[in-house]
Amino acid sequence: MKLRDTLSRQLQPVTADDSGVVSVYSCGPTVYDYPHLGNWYAFLRWDLLIRTLRADGFKPVWVMNITDVGHLVSDGDEGEDKLAKKARSERKTAYEVADFYTSYFLEALKRLNFTAPDHLPKASQHIEQQISLIEELEKKGFTYLIDDGVYYDTAKLADYGKLAKLDKEGVQAGARVEFNPQKRNATDFALWKLTPANQVRDMEWDSPWGKGFPGWHLECSAMCRHYLGQPINIHAGGIDHIPVHHTNELAQSEAAYDRPLAKIWLHSDFITVNGEKMSKSLNNFYTLEDIEAKGYDLRVLRLAVFSVRYRSLADFNWDMMEAADRRLSRLQALSARRYQLQGAGEADVLASRLQTTLEEVGRELADDLNSPKALEKLDEVAQGLAAEKMPDAVKPHLEAFIREVDEIFGLKLSELADLRPEQRELLDKRAAAREVGDFNLGDRLREELSAGGIKVLDTDYGQIWRPS
């Protein structure tokens, strides 16, 4: 399996330790609001990464952080903490806001059928580890103290900015990095923000430098090392993290411990709406609730996400959701064939076709998570077998195929149930009506089945049903 590493700009082989473990850290939510689809696209892509690693024989250990303190309105070090700002607007404490949106996020992971991360650490519960990291940097001369906190001196790291290919000399204070006149360099960033003397914050802790809270970038370095060690195998996040968050995370981790932070850096590209990045600031975003309000199963969203490769720009629109909905219907129709086999017959050819498809899917995903190509392979077999006669002997092969597709794409196709007795009775009545030429009754029964969510297809060897 190979993935495109952002640092080297090349495909790199995925490696594991001697027991097959692959350590994966992915940036999770800042829990001050509901995640929008731009967030979910990245999270779902890393879910696919974990599932693909497992299918490829690896043993992934996945850490996804929860940012509940330290993420300022600016991605630099100016402005208000997002949690504190939300708490003030909702007349709650920052802890109450964090707890509410964390609970929502964890429930949403279940709704979307995520693989459960091995660890979901909160920044606020790992202050000790973050202070220890600052102390390590302080010992090595990478820090300095100014009025509002402890800062990392980027001039002390020769290759600072290598992830984003930043030109340090050319970086000017601006849109992404706010300027503080006490900072030595425009790219310097806060490790610990001090609470002003006239303020009391919900989230603040004592430290060797005074009462305050950790910088946003610090939490990922500290928690990544705490749970996975250093270097890890794969670090994943959004492409917008490259120039600031991941650049700073890499800098502080590698300066503190004199070794690479990650062997592979993986980044999910932007999601746009009408050509603009989907974001809360532009108010052009959609949520999971918007998807459901349109009548879509959340599995359709999974397929829509996977229809675009993780490192390609995706423009969200309802046409792509319609295409994903049709794709889900085709796969459900194939799953339904488990309940409608046609007696004796040879299964070798069909079994071979199913196995070959799984191998092709695996090869596409092992090629830098080429999910669009992998889904095309599923389409080919689903469409090719849609009306093909299937003998009883193919059942174990088809069931194994459906289980494997579920393991990789998280679609719950195996959970599709057989017809209820009353539906089976309607289907049998329709077959009998058509047998005696009563096509009007057959059409009425078809419409009744359709109203109950069952679509019927007539073939040379009888009726085939599928969920509608």
Image: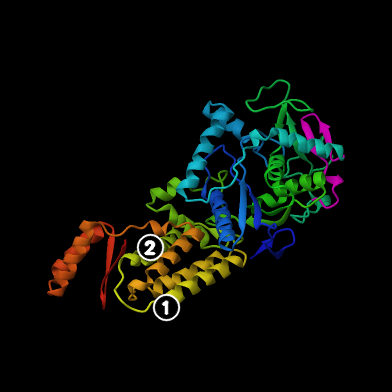
Is residue 135 placed above or below 300 in the rendered structure? above
Is residue 319 magenta-colored?
A: no
* Residue type indicated by callout 1: Asp
- Residue identifier under label 2: 332
Residue at coordinates 61% horizontally, 30% vertically from top-left? Answer: 84
Image disc number at residue 348: 1
| Cα separation between marks 1 and 2 | 23 Å
Residue at coordinates 54% horizontally, 38% vertically from top-left? Answer: 102
Which of the 4 quarters of the picture holds residue 31?
A: top right
> Are the residues at dot 1 and dot 2 in contact (C-beta closer than 8 Å)?
no
Q: Earlier in the sequence, mark 1 or mark 2?
A: 2
Badge 2: residue crowd in 10 Å (few <14, some 14–19, many ≥20): many
Q: In terms of secondary structure, where does tag 2 sit?
A: helix
Residue 338 in the figure: left or right of residue 235: left
Which of the 4 quarters of the picture holds residue 417?
A: bottom left
- Quarter of the picture containing the N terminus is bottom right
Image disc number at residue 39: none
Nearest to viewer (mark 1 / mark 2)? 1
Residue 235 in the figure: left or right of residue 390: right
Residue at coordinates 67% horizontally, 49% vertically from top-left? Answer: 241
Residue at coordinates 73% horizontally, 36% vertically from top-left? Answer: 130
Determine if residue 172 is in view.
no
Q: In terms of secondary structure, where does tag 1 sit?
A: helix
The colour scheme used here is: rainbow
Q: For the magenta stretch, what is the residue range?
A: 141-160
| Residue at the farthest top position | 198
Is residue 152 magenta-colored?
A: yes
Residue 292 screen position, x and y as percent: 40, 49
